Structure formats: structure tokens, C-alpha cells
Image (spheres, helix red, strand yellow):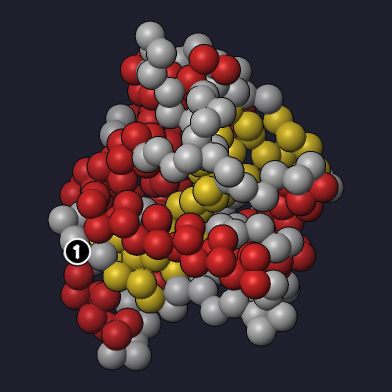
Amino acid sequence: MHEQLFSQFIAPDCDRLQFIQSRLNEAGLDAPVLRMEGKNHVYVRFPQTQYNPMFRIKTVIAHYDRIGIGANDNSAAVFCLIEWAAQIFRAYTGGRFHNIRLIFTDGEELGSGGSGVSEQGAFPLAQVFRRLGIKNDDIFVFDCMGRGTVPVLTQTVLSKNAGSAFRKDFLALEQRAMDLLRASAGGNWFCLPCNYSDNASFIANAIPAVAITMLPSQEVQQVLAGSQPETWRILHTSDDNPASLQSESFKVFQRILANLAEMRVPAL
């Protein structure tokens, strides 16, 4: 990770929307803004030649809004995804395809503190997906990927009112996410109860979505024992700063993203 650029990204006065667009534009990618109910989501437009309709689209989402410094929540994941977008744009040529749809969302933090999922910036985005009939994507949400080396799949308890088709599709996506994490972290991964991220907005609109985060191995044991890990305790505080990040985390995240780009699931 380019430390100087990352420092610029987490600076208090950084225009993060402009930063994301500029970095993507410099890589040769168009990055239009999707304005929805006062929030600005960034859509990364890859060439159509990098898609194959025979396989499912993989929608990757990370929120770029923050509370305080937000080095881990969610600057680390966003910064890595910007770099990854440039990498796959350059690498997937000559008939190679990745089928990645990448969106940086605004307003995820509005859903924290008990204000409700409908307040999340991604909620109207999920509504647009539903209206357009976009229900067959594999949606992966990445949040707080800058600490630890153990990928964690957010444990999701589906509503009793969830339809059988939605339940079937969600469980299939969840299994693919498990397989992805298992392959990317040498089998060292967990499914744990976590706070919801933008996945909640999609699930609320009957669209399957999974959220992935990261924890140090000793903190996973804390969660299993019923305690809140330090990584989660420092979110939204001044301790969520660059000193709290761990370089090994980015290596694991990069493997997850590399494997995700190569994932091939036949379209319906």
C-alpha cells in the first residue's frame, strides 16, 4: 500500500469522493457518481470486454464515509480496492474477464447507533437494484479489513419471513463466500456475529449479500468467548488510526480479491 497516498486519504480535510475519482481516473477508469437521496456513491466503470455474460456478476461494495480518522473503518478496504481496480483493469485483457462490479458507497455510518438500516446510504442503492431486477449478482461487502489475518464472514440470521427462493440464494452465496475465504487464508477463517454493514441494506430489499471483515486470531477467540475484541472497541474513536493497522492484513485481503476476480459461477 502506498503509505503517502493513504495518509492523504485519511487526512481530516481530504475530499474522499474527489480522491477516489481522481485515483481511478488516473488509472484510466471512468468513475461516475450515483447521487441518491443526498449521498454520492462511486461506480467504477470497467470495459465491457472484461465481462462474460455466461457467468455471474460479482458486485463488490465498500463504504468510504467515516467517523473520525477511520483508518480501518473503512479507509483500509477502500484504498486497497482502488488499487485493485487499477490492477484488474490492466491485467484482464485479451479475452480475460473478471465480472467485477465495484461500488464505493456513501452514508453507511448513518445506519450505526441504532438509527436503522433504512438510513444507510446504500439502502436506496439496493432499492434501485431491486427495481431493475438485479438480484442474481454475488454481492460482497468489505468493511474493516486492516487488522489481523483471519477473514471473518458476518453471521447472518435470516428473518422467518424470508422467502424460500431468497433463503436458497443467500445460503448459496454464503457458501461461495466461505469457499473464497477458505482458499484465500489457508483455511484460517471464521463465521462470527458482527455488526451489519451495507449488506443489511441489500438483505432488507430481499437481495442476498454477505459482509466480510478481518480480525487478529487472538481477537477471534475473544469473540468466541463472548467478549468484544479491541478491533471493534476502537472503531469510531481516535485509536482507529494508521498505528492500529497491520501490514499482514493487506496481504490476506489482496489474496481474497485476487481469488474473487478469478471466481467463476455460471449465470442462471
Q: Position of residue 220 (x, y in %)?
A: 26, 75
Q: Is residue 1 left or right of residue 106?
A: left
Give above or below for 206 relative to 28.
Answer: below
Give above or below for 170 relative to 79.
Answer: below
Disc 1 residue type (three-letter): Asn
Q: Is residue 163 left or right of residue 260?
A: right
Give the image quarter of residue 7: top left
Q: Position of residue 226 (x, y in %)?
A: 34, 90
Give above or below for 199 relative to 103.
Answer: below
Front in this rendered view, residue 154 or 244: 154
Give the image quarter of residue 235: bottom left
Residue lying at 63% horizontally and 32% vertically, measured from the top left: 43
Give above or below for 175 relative to 157.
Answer: above
Q: Is residue 231 visible?
A: no
Residue sticking out furthest to the top? 94
Give the image quarter of residue 264: top left
What residue did someone put label 1 on?
188
Q: Position of residue 94 (x, y in %)?
A: 38, 9
Residue sticking out furthest to the front? 268
